[in-house]
Structures are given as structure tokens and as C-alpha cells.
Image (spheres, helix red, strand yellow):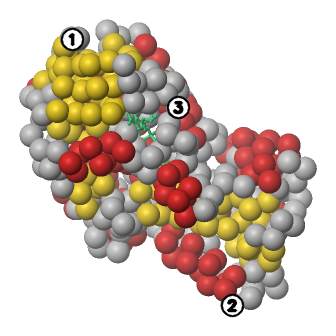
Amino acid sequence: MPTFDVLVIGSGASGLAAAVSAERAGARVALATKGALQSCNSAKAQGGIQAAFGDDDSPEQHAADVWKSSHETANMELVEILTAEAPSAIHWLEELGVEFTRENGGYRLARCGGASRKRLLQVGDRTGHAITKALREAVESSTITTFPNAPLHALEPRWRARCGDHELEAETVVLAAGGRCFREAEERGELSTNHPGATGEVTQIALELGAQARDLDALQYHPNGGAWPPNMQGYSIPETTRAYGAVLLNADGEEFTDSLGPRDVVSQAIVDEVAKGKGVETPDGRPAVYLDTTRISAHDAELSLPYMLRRYRAGGIDPLGERILTYPVLHYQNGGLVIDADAQTTVESLYACGEIAGGTHGRNRMMGNSLLECVVFGRRAGRAAARN
Ligand SMILES: Cc1cc2nc3c(=O)[nH]c(=O)nc-3n(C[C@H](O)[C@H](O)[C@H](O)COP(=O)(O)OP(=O)(O)OC[C@H]3O[C@@H](n4cnc5c(N)ncnc54)[C@H](O)[C@@H]3O)c2cc1C
């Protein structure tokens, strides 16, 4: 039976970051994932990643914004690590080859929902794609053994894993298998932004091993799911549209909420507006409101929203020429497995990082902090698992 020091489950940003970090710390590492190495939610992330680089900003301010957006439910020990290590996480990604969009000699920073400062770094509007590509290339040029198409089915303590057709042994295991919003949306008969692998069975395996979880009931709706045309249904319209000037309007063309409020507040405001009869209907009868994207300048759109523009224009709609239709869509699992500062779960030598873990965002995540969490806690999990 192949034996490793560290077995990582999942090939999203958190699993890739953990695997690279564990290998660089000297461990023999295996990475097993459900589908292709490329298949994950991380690669779909468009908007960006937060880090306090602005002259008027600081990790403390970043942490205060997380605390407020979480409605004071986040684990502040984890939040302080997240925000303090954000700048070094960005530099680490740059060393791996990620090129963040720059202007005026610095990073191009946007303000995202719930943030008091401009803090969102972007790679155009394909930030997650750029980050996972760089991390995957680091994995592929390392000694890490990868097992694609090898979903974790069973895990026995200290540690023997059945991953697809493979039986693997390892001293420590890092769970980085993401959230469950694809399955949850299917069960609710709703749309989701998630990839089909986001089904949550690894969380279940961890719970059966005795790991504790928190806030598992707190699922996040992205305020701006695409509602029309059909090719954009379930697409998450980047929050950067609103950072660059788009606003939400009701059927009468009135602004009914702060378009850059925390996600849960904005989503609820849209649902309430539609319930009041002030929404609009898509041609196929779905509820919606307007997102007035015509207020975005062509310059900002070309630099920060090129992929979104291409997708809409392919569907016959030009967001710079007309308002688009939007409605909240199931997006993110806020809660997850309880972890400590090393990303260890409450079960010894079992680690968790990324969307599968809970605490960093409390019950309501801010945009741009998930990719950051993947890198910060993926690195911590990988290093600690290699040491264990
Ligand atoms: C459309 C979209 C846009 C987003 N935009 C942003 C953004 O702009 N900024 C931001 O910070 N966040 C964003 N997010 C959220 C963020 O991308 C994700 O929460 C984060 O990347 C999750 O990373 P992860 O590594 O935890 O999980 P994932 O990237 O989902 O990876 C999980 C991996 O585990 C594998 N897996 C699942 N089950 C098993 C199993 N049983 N056995 C083995 N492997 C398994 C999957 O195949 C996958 O490879 C966005 C999410 C989506 C869906």
C-alpha cells in the first residue's frame, strides 16, 4: 500500500496550497481528488482576493470588517491570522507566478461588499483561475504524487484512506474538499454557482470520525446570480460590478439597498423587494431585479470585467449598454469543521482548510476572503501536517 507523510484530499486552492507547503516542508505528499485536478470551485472565482495594501488600510481594519460582516460570529483568532498573513500570501502567490492587475505603480484595489476600504486584488475577472493554475503548476513540478478521479470514500484513523480504486496510508490527512452548495441547491430545486463536485461527503466522513463542526446551517446566497439570458443562469456576476459603480434597481428604477452592503443583507433586500411586488420577471418567469451595469466605465470594465462582458455579449446582452437581470443564488458554505490556528480539526493529525473549515467567516463571509483563507490556512495546514 502506498504510504505518505501527508495525504491531501481535494485540488482546489486550499488543497493545492496545502500540498505545495507540505512538500516544501520536506514531507512525502499525496494529493487525491474527486475528478480532474482542474475541477473545483476555486478556479471559478472571478472577483478577487482581499489583502490590506491601501495606504489607509491595515490588517486590523481588515479584521474589523470581517468581524462586522460576520455579525460578530467569527473566530477572532483565525481572523487575525487571516488578515495579518494576507500580504505575505499575496507575495507567495506572486512568487508562484500569479500576476495581479496593477495601476499607478501599485495593485488595482476595489472595495467589496462589507469592506470599509479598497482591498480587493484582482487578476482581471479570472482571479481564481490564475491562482489555481499557478498552484497546480507548482504541484506538477514537485515530488507530490497526484491521484485524480479518486474520490475519498472512507477514512480510518491514523490514517488509511480509500480514494477511488486506491488504498493509501499517511501519517496526517488534510481535508480540503470544499463545501456542499451544489448538492444543497439540487435538493432545494434552486440554481447554484458551484461546480458539481461540491457535495459535502468529506465533511460527513470527518463528522463520523468525531470532528466538531460549527455554523453548518449558515449557507450563503450570492446576491447577484445571473437570471437572464439562460446561459448566465447560476452564474455569479462578480461583486466587482458593484465595486465599479453598478447599482441594484427595482422595477420602478429606484435604488432599494446599499449595493455594497454585506452579502446576506443585500441578498435579503432583493428577496424582500421581489416579495413586495417591486421586482421584475425574466422572460422564462423567474424573479429578478435590475443590476444597472451601464454605470460602469468602459475603462473599468475592460480592465476588471472582461470575462463577464464576453459571457453576456455571447448571450446577446451588452451590460454596458443595458441593465442586466439578477437574483440571489446559492453560493457558499459559511460554516464547517472547527479548526485551530494550525488548521488542525478537533481530531488529532486531521487537518482542514478552505471552504470545508468553519470559523474564519463566522456565519457570513465577505467576498474575497475565501481565496485568501485557502492560501493562508492551506499553507498553515500543509506545514503543520508535515511537522506532525
Ligand atoms: C462562481 C464562484 C465565484 C467565486 N468568487 C470568489 C471570489 O471572487 N473571491 C473569493 O475569495 N472567493 C470566491 N468564491 C469562493 C471560493 O472560490 C471558494 O470558496 C474556494 O475557492 C473554495 O476552495 P476550496 O479549496 O476549499 O474548495 P474547492 O475549490 O471547491 O475544491 C474542492 C476540491 O475537493 C474535491 N473533492 C470534493 N469532494 C471530494 C471527495 N469526496 N474526495 C476527493 N476530493 C473531493 C473537488 O473535486 C475539488 O477539487 C467563488 C466561488 C464560486 C463558486
Residue 345 visible (yes or no): no
Circle 1 sits on which residue?
A: 1
> Secondary structure under badge 1?
loop
Q: Earlier in the sequence, mark 2 or mark 3?
A: 3
Spatial CA distance of label 1 from label 3 is 26 Å
Residue 130: x and y in percent read 55, 31
Residue 263: percent from left, percent from top: 51, 68
Residue 39, disc = 3
Q: Residue furthest bottom?
A: 276
Mark carried by residue 249: none
Q: Residue at x 32, y 18 (%)?
A: 166
User: Who comes first in sequence, dot 1 or dot 3?
Assistant: 1
Answer whether labels 2 and 3 touch (C-beta < 8 Å).
Answer: no
Which is nearer the N-term, disc 2 or disc 1?
Answer: 1
- Mark 3 near ligand 1 (CB under 8 Å)? yes
**Residue 13 in the image: above or below residue 276:** above
User: For the residue carrying disc 1, how many other residues have a C-alpha within 10 Å: few (<14), some (14-19), or many (20+)?
Assistant: few
Query: What residue would you read off at disc 2?
Result: 276
In three-dimensional space, the C-alpha distance between marks 2 and 1, rounded to whole angstroms, equals 61 Å
Q: Residues within 10 Å of mark 3 (few under 14, many from 20)?
A: some
Q: Name the one closer to the observer, 27 or 154.
A: 154
